[in-house]
Image: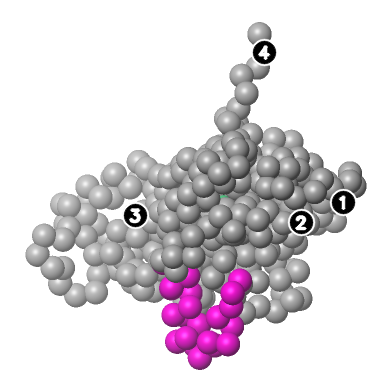
Amino acid sequence: MAEQKRERILSGIQPTGEMQIGNYFGAVQNWVRLQDSYECFFGIVDLHAITMPYQPEQLRKNTERLAVDLIACGIDPGKSLLFIQSLIPEHTDLCWIVSCFCSFGNLTRMTQFKEKSEQLKSQSKDHFFSAGLFTYPVLQAADILIYKASVVPVGQDQKQHLELTADIARRFNNEFGEVFVEPKILFTETPKVMSLADPSKKMGKSLGPKHYIGLFEEEESIRAKVRTAVTDSGVLPEGVEMSPGLENLFEILGACGKVDLVSEMKRDYKAGKLKYSLLKESVADALVELTGNLRASRAEIKPKAVQKSVEEMSMKARAVARETLREVRELAGLPARSVGD
Ligand code: TRP
């Protein structure tokens, strides 16, 4: 019996520096699981990373490091294709073509664009507020459409970008002929990991070191950060069962797989006898275990070998991308390119 064709997944992650546990629980851990049931393409999207101010040397390091880190997390070159976006010029070729099928009005309504431009304005970096930042979602659409991916695992914050991608695909297909697959979003059940020092905000590196736990962080600093994490800050409002800080610690403990501990300690909390120091110790233990395992698997990886393997995977992805671009060029009335371009 012929093997049933697996659906194709594409997702992307920006090389913006050290990964933190929020990235892991929110995306990468799920990618690792999806590898067994889907044909997966995962992109390190360096061309998206340059839409915000950056240092060239840092970007190069971040890209190389992210490839190693992703493999340490379990992205398996034997199962998936992990590629670097800028090594595949078909992404930007297609980006231009599909930008002509993307409504300007829709782009102006993208909340991520509004947020990032606000951020630049508030840092008095208005001069970095670029056309690239504005057309970021079109490049994302090209990332997806170039592989005819039918499933895209992303968080809620990417919903608008995925709807835009589907709009573009539909519009091109209707006008010139069926080539693109309209992708479905796979919203992943992911824990919402908040900052340790300010649990009203999503965990992120831009808030500063106190706020996040690095995915490969050392034991001592993990313990120190968890120990000083905000728990209860005053009286809880009517109807609220638990402070956001406490809730976040439970969320992290659960994400580390310690579900029995979570229910036990929540029971204690309800009974008014939970020792916060004990909860914090359990959270720190779980995180130390996770990062320890990840550090150990990263120590076994040779960065040079990863670089070579990612280049090879990028060339395999490129072969798929090239084929889609060939079909698109034909439908769009652009001349055929000779092989090898
Ligand atoms: N915009 C995504 C993010 O910020 C990253 C991304 C780029 C992406 N291209 C993609 C995600 C294609 C999914 C599919 O997280």
Q: Is residue 100 magenta?
A: no
| Residue at figure coordinates x 44%, y 62% from the top left | 106
The 10 Å Cα crowd at callout 3, few under 14, some 14 to 19, many 20 or more, is many
Q: Position of residue 263 (x, y in %)?
A: 29, 44
Instruction: For mark 3, give the secondary structure.
Output: helix
Q: Does the CB distance between marks 4 and 2 fall below 8 Å?
A: no
**For marks 1 and 2 on the same chain, the one whose residue lies earlier in the sequence:** 2
Dividing the image into four equal quarters, which quarter contains ligand 1? bottom right
Element marked by disc 4? loop
Q: Identify which residue, 143 or 324, lies in the foreground.
A: 324
User: Is residue 233 at all visible to an observer of this figure?
Assistant: yes
Q: Tell me the residue that label 4 is attached to.
A: 2
Q: What's the residue type where badge 1 is placed? A: Asp
The answer for how far apart the CA atoms under marks 3 and 2 are is 44 Å
CA–CA distance in space, label 3 to label 1: 53 Å
Is 69 placed left or right of 226 in the picture?
Answer: right
Nearer-N-terminus badge (4/2): 4
> Which quarter shows the N terminus?
top right
The answer to if 111 sits in the magenta stretch is yes
Residue designated by label 2: 89
Residue named by callout 3: 250
Query: Could you tell me the amino acid type at mark 3?
Result: Phe
The circle drawn on residue 176 is: none
Q: Position of residue 310 (x, y in %)?
A: 78, 50
> Are circles 4 and 3 on residues that touch, CB within 8 Å?
no
Which circle, 4 or 1, is nearer the viewer? 1
Residue pictured at 61% horizontal, 19% vertical: 4
Q: Which residue is mark 1?
A: 341
Point out the stretch of residues depicted in magenta: 110-132
